[in-house]
Image (cartoon, grey):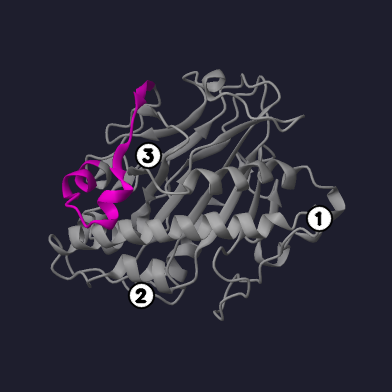
C-alpha cells in the first residue's frame, strides 16, 4: 500500500491516552491499541498519571541545554567518529538536503548499561561529560523508567498481536525491552531557529520496536528559564504526524504525558497489525532565543535477533511517500542488525 503525502497542515490532534493504572492492572486496552497503532491509527499512544515521572523529566531535560553549551574541548571528548557519532555527542553529523544539520545536537547513551554489549558493529561504552556528573544519574533514571513503562505497554501489545497473528511468538516485544540491553537513549537539544523554515527533524519512521518520548521542554537559551508552553503553541511549531491520507497533523501534548511511538521493527514482527507513521519536528521559525529539549529511548533488539515473518507477510509493506521504501530496506531472513544498517544507509544519516 502506498501512502501519498499531501504536505498540508490540517489540524491538531490529541493522541490516544492510556492510564498507567490500566497498564499495571492488565485492563483490556485492545480498542485503544487499535486506535493508536492499527492501520488507521497515527502510530502514537500516550501514557498518563505515571508516578514520579514529572520529577524525573524535569531532572533531565534542562541538562540537554547544558550539554549543548559545554566548552568545545569537552564536547570534543564526547565525540565518537569511529562509530559514526551514534554514541556520545553529535552535532552537524546528520544531513538535511545534502548539507550538515546544525539545528539540533544529540547526546546518546545506553540507559541500562555503561559497558557496550559484546556484539559486532557500532558499539562503544557510554561516555559522560566530566563537568556534568548529574547527567549520568538523571539520564539513567528517566531512561530506565521509560523502558519499565514501555515493557508494561509491550505486554499488552504482545497479547494484541497474538490474537491476530498465528505465527507470532508470545511475549516477543516485552522480552526484547526487558532483556536485550540494546536500547539507545537520545537527549535532544534543538537550537533556536528564528526566521528559519528548516525542520528541526525531518520526516522519518522510527525503525526500533517502540520509541518512548517525553513531551518537550522549552527553555530560554540564554538563561535556562522554562518558557511557558502557551507561548510556543502556534500551529507551526512542534511534533507533526502524517496520517494514512498523507495529511499533516500536529500532536497536542501536555507535559505529564509520556509518548510511545510504534517502530518498523514492531510493524514487521506483528505482520503489519501495528504500523509506524511518518513524523517530524517543525520549527515554525518564530521562537526567538527559545530552544526545544526532549528525550527519546529507542527500544531495539540485539543485532543478531532474527526478524521472523510468516510466508504471507505482504501486509507489512506500508509505503509512505518521502520515506525510503520498507520493501527495499527489509528482506525476509534479515536480522535486526541487517535491517538497522540498511535503514541507516537509506536515510543517509
Identify which residue is drawn at 63% across, 22% down: 287
Residues in magenta, as a range: 9-35
Q: Would you say residue 275 is visible in this rendering?
A: no
Q: Residue furthest bottom?
A: 118
Categorize mark 3 by other alpha carbons within 10 Å: few (<14), some (14-19), many (20+): few
Q: Earlier in the sequence, mark 3 or mark 2?
A: 2
Under circle 3, the secondary element is: loop
Residue 321 got which mark?
3
Please check the rendered image and state whether residue 23 is part of the magenta-colored stretch, yes or no. Answer: yes
Left or right position of 166 against 291: left
Q: Would you say residue 297 is visible in this rendering?
A: yes
> Which residue is the site of mark 1?
131
The image quadrant where one finds the N terminus is: top left
Q: Please tell me whether residue 301 is drawn above or below residue 13 in the rendered image.
A: below
Q: Tell me whether the residue at label 3 lies in contact with that at label 2, contact meaning CB atoms closer than 8 angstroms.
A: no
Q: Position of residue 268 (x, y in %)?
A: 30, 61
Quarter of the rendering containing residue 242: top left
Amino acid at each position: 500500500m502506498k501512502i501519498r503525502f499531501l504536505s498540508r497542515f490540517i489540524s491538531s490532534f490529541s493522541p490516544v491516552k492510556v492510564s498507567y493504572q490500566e497498564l499495571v492492572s492488565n485492563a483490556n486496552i485492545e480498542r485503544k491499541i487499535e486506535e493508536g497503532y492499527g492501520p488507521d491509527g497515527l502510530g502514537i499512544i500516550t501514557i498518563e498519571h505515571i508516578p514520579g515521572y514529572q520529577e524525573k523529566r524535569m531532572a533531565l531535560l534542562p541538562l540537554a541545554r547544558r550539554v549543548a553549551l559545554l566548552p568545545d574541548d569537552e564536547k570534543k571528548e564526547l565525540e565518537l567518529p569511529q562509530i559514526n557519532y551514534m554514541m556520545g555527542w553529535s552535532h552537524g553529523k546528520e544531513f538535511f538536503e545534502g548539507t550538515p544539520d546544525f539545528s539540533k545536537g544529540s547526546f546518546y547513551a545506553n540507559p541500562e548499561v555503561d559497558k557496550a554489549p559484546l556484539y559486532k558493529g557500532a558499539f562503544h561504552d557510554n561516555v559522560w561529560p566530566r563537568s556534568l556528573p548529574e547527567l549520568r544519574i538523571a539520564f539513567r533514571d528517566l531512561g530506565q523508567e521509560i523502558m519499565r513503562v514501555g515493557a508494561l505497554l509491550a505486554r499488552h501489545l504482545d497479547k494484541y498481536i497474538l490474537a491476530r497473528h498465528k505465527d507470532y511468538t508470545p511475549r516477543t516485544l516485552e522480552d526484547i525491552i526487558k532483556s536485550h540491553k540494546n536500547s539507545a537513549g537520545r537527549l535532544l537539544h534543538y537550537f533556536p531557529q528564528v526566521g528559519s523554515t528548516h525542520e528541526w527533524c525531518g520526516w522519518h519512521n522510527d525503525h526500533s520496536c517502540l520509541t518512548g518520548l517525553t513531551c518537550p521542554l522549552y527553555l530560554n537559551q540564554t538563561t535556562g528559564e522554562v518558557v511557558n508552553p502557551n507561548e510556543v503553541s502556534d500551529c507551526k511549531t512542534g511534533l507533526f504526524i502524517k496520517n494514512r491520507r498523507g495529511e499533516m497533523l500536529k500532536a497536542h501534548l501536555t507535559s505529564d504525558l509520556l509518548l510511545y511511538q510504534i517502530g518498523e521493527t514492531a510493524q514487521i514482527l506483528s505482520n503489519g497489525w501495528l504500523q509506524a507513521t511518518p513524523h517530524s519536528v517543525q520549527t515554525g521559525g518564530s521562537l526567538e532565543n527559545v530552544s526545544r529539549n526532549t528525550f527519546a529511548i529507542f527500544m531495539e533488539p540485539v543485532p543478531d535477533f532474527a526478524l521472523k515473518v510468516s510466508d504471507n507477510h505482504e501486509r507489512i509493506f506500508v509505503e509512505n511517500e518521502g520515506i525510503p521504501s520498507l520493501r527495499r530496506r527489509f528482506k525476509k531472513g534479515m536480522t535486526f542488525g541487517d535491517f538497522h544498517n540498511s535503514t541507516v544507509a537509506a536515510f543517509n544519516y
